[in-house]
Image: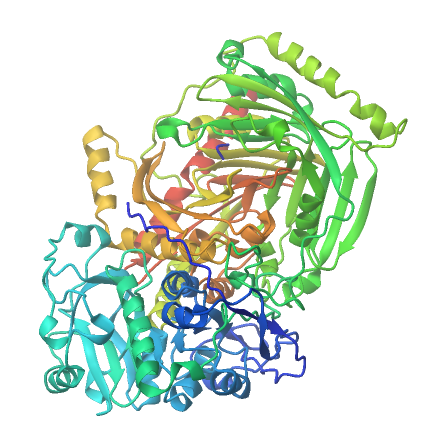
Amino acid sequence: MNFGLVSPSYVIPSPFSTGLQSTDEKLPISRTVGRLGCFSKQGQLQVLNCDDRKVGVSPHLVIGSLQESSVVKKHPGDEANLRCKVVRTLLIDNYDSYTYNVYHELSVINGVPPVVVRNDEWTWEYIQHQLYEEKAFDNIVISPGPGSPECPADIGICLRLLLECKDIPILGVCLGHQALGYVNGARVVHAPEPVHGRLSEIEHIGGGLFNGIPSGRNSGFKVVRYHSLVIDADSLPEELIPIAWTTSRDTLSFVDAQDSNVIPNAFVDYFSTNIKTSCSWASKNSRGMGDGKVVMGIMHLARPHYGVQFHPESVATSCGRQIFENFKKITEDYWLRSSPINERKVHSSAWMQVSHENQLFKKMPNVDLIAKKANGRNPFTMYNTVMLAHERIGARFLTLKWKKLNGLASQVGGTRNIFCQLFGNQKAENTFWLDSSSIEQNRARFSFMGGKGGPLWKQVTFKLSDQSDTTAKCGGNLSIKDSQGFLRSIYLKDGFLDFLDKELQSFHCEREDYEELPFDFCGGYIGFIGYNLKVECGVTSNRHKSSSPDASFFFVDNFIVTDHLYDDVYILSLHDICQPEGSTAQLESCSTISWLEDAEKKLLDLNFFTSGQSKKQTSQHVMLTPHNAGFLAEKSRGQYIKDVEKCLGFIKDGESYELCLTTQMRKKIEDIDCLELYLNLREKNPAPYAAWLNFATESLCICCSSPERFLRLDKNGILEAKPIKGTIARGSTPEEDTMLKLRLQHSEKDQAENLMIVDLLRNDLSRVCEPGSVHVPKLMEMESYATVHTLVSTIRGKKQENLSPVDCVRAAFPGGSMTGAPKLRSMELIDSLESSSRGIYSGSIGFFSCNQTFDLNIVIRTVVVHEDEASIGAGGAIVALSNPEDEYEEMILKTQAPLRTIAEYQNRLQSNQS
């Protein structure tokens, strides 16, 4: 398993000054408003009556007063230089999935990362203290978010900030923009139509926030919009001036926007020198605007408050960074005019960290904002009261032995033959195969396989406790079975990911053991993470309990790798070099060399069988329904369509931009050869991130033909996500196939789906990557598979050195392509609509290596066989442009490969028996 647009990378200059430390534990603790929708006692989601939303408590807000502490020796002129280069921003997060895209931009532009706090984390008194007594911030940015500014649970402290902070520069984005209008008396109403992931051309008055940015039709200034609500232009009070609006009611798809001509010099420079003249012009000409134009920007006449309805942080918005740079300039000019700048304190980063119940990392304060690096390499600082280094207690020193067999794979029948003959006996129990069965277009290169191995081998299986289904606690029971068959169980109070993190951090493997290998995996854990582990990644609860384990992994010490590019085979063995002399484990570890020799001999002696291999299947164009395949679907066609309509209602009301609705279908099966089933699936639907897992103790087999990578961390510290959004069936003729590809490529709906998830994944990576490093090298590329064409994007970033692989997974799991955006609110809405747990479907399969790398897929196009029942999950992203009937047909399309595999397999069995 090897297993567009490019945003430039920037280097953050390290400012020389002071850090911020937490010393006062007696700060005012805010009472947090219950987030992400409210559930009645009957469990029904209520989103319309905001006043009924309950108030909860954030129980461990670990933050104190901020004090200057010298971290480096100051030099003459340093403070003056800092005042010119560094702007300190308080970024209010409205529980959005794009906040850290804003954070990423501000980190680059301001010269120091902003401080991010959620809108219900700090009391007004504490914020007031930081702004007016400590003078810790120069400006405030209010993020986008779901919901409405009229609802206290959606907007939190933001309205108070806009009312009270009359002399602090504030920029509101989307929901923040609406809040600026609402708090000053404007009405927030439904937009003429919900617009999410689509672009509009913008006209503006120039100067200020839009200084140096072109304006009007064909100017090249196109912005991405994610909103269902707008400010009613007719209700704007005199003190609010519209400064930008759409040029028309029409929107553009991403591809259409790229095709438009750009007029580089279409600037409105005649407004840029006199803001009063601009405001006067806007006041006279843009109120009550007709022709379907929508207000896209406002400013306050008497306060340094600005708002933009669109998303300047989106990867597809042109001139987005310029807007944030202009706001920085506005801030600098404002403080130069309004007060002596030396009255405001200068810190190396105004770096405050917040830890709360639903935050990303249990042992770290708001890791989205973490910076732990020292030695002047990074300006980030941390609270010493909350930052915990990864412990190395109980470290295990491992050594890796391996051998390469050049060009052997095809000589012995390929990857399939190697697996079947070496690991296929006894129903392939307790085996794994990360199977790059589709290697076209360099999609994948390596496959990893193995079975029950040496003395380090073990199987760990985790099941969340019943309590985890209703509370934010994520404890559960872990069973551990070792290579000798001994089984023990322990309760993990802090959950599985915490256990996995400690395990991986305890391993030490010398780089020279694996640095010459062309792949990342050098032994470690291979298995799956189920969808319900979202409760360990910031989600408050699971509405449904999974019948299958929530996570299960093998610790792999002996394994085989095939290189599909060069046809090489690698045999590898990992063992512990610190076992006591004479111990059983030490004696068994001596068998490493003999295992390598034995594996080599078996490989060289393999017979090249071809009779068991079926021919590659051609695309089938008659849709097979679950009923016709003997499956019982959880939702009928009518029920699924009604759920899609409910999703569209949530989107219209601003509760979500995109909802990834799914359903399950099940069938009782007995005496099935699951390996044969998987072999048929991989032939019918080869995929770059396919996988076979057999956990015999759990009566669980997973036959996965996934085309989608969730997240990878390589040896160079580069994180990569490859979300798929946009799917269409293959054609029955070459001409029809080409036509369908073009239809997908130019589909405004599918482009909107993809763009929304790309921006979401950029956000998730920005939480754990170096500022300025997250970029999109490939946007909406076409990939074709046996049954479908898809749109695939690639997002990459450089991981912060202080963070672990599990930290990165926590930041992004579940994959955004399976949730929608904003992620947290969307998952709660989805839980209210879906009638059972997704289980393994929508989770991830892959490896966590001892060398601190990992590669995980998204579990789709998969058959899960658990306790004699086969289940298939499928679904699709619902956006404002969705048609309910079409969404049902797309969901059925995605089931075709696994459905046909089971149907044809059982038909063959019946034929053989008769």
Number of marks in the image? 0
Q: Residue at x 33, y 52 (%)?
A: 754
> x%, y% of residue 786?
36, 31
Quick check: 834 left or right of 748?
right
Q: Is residue 647 above or below residue 302?
A: above
Residue 672 seen in the current view: no
Q: Residue at x 54, y 70 (%)?
A: 18
Between 228 and 591, the one nearer to me in the picture? 591
Q: Is residue 403 above or below residue 378?
A: above
Quick check: 551 left or right of 85?
right
Q: In the figure, residue 246 lies in which quadrant?
A: bottom left
Between 873 and 171, the one nearer to me in the picture? 171
Quick check: 460 left or right of 245?
right
> x%, y% of residue 492?
74, 55
> x%, y% of residue 352?
55, 71
Q: In the figure, residue 222 lies in which quadrant?
A: bottom left
Residue 434 seen in the current view: yes
Q: Is residue 164 above or below residue 291?
A: below
Residue furthest toward the front? Answer: 76
**Image quadrant in which the C terminus is located:** top right
Color scheme of the displayed model: rainbow
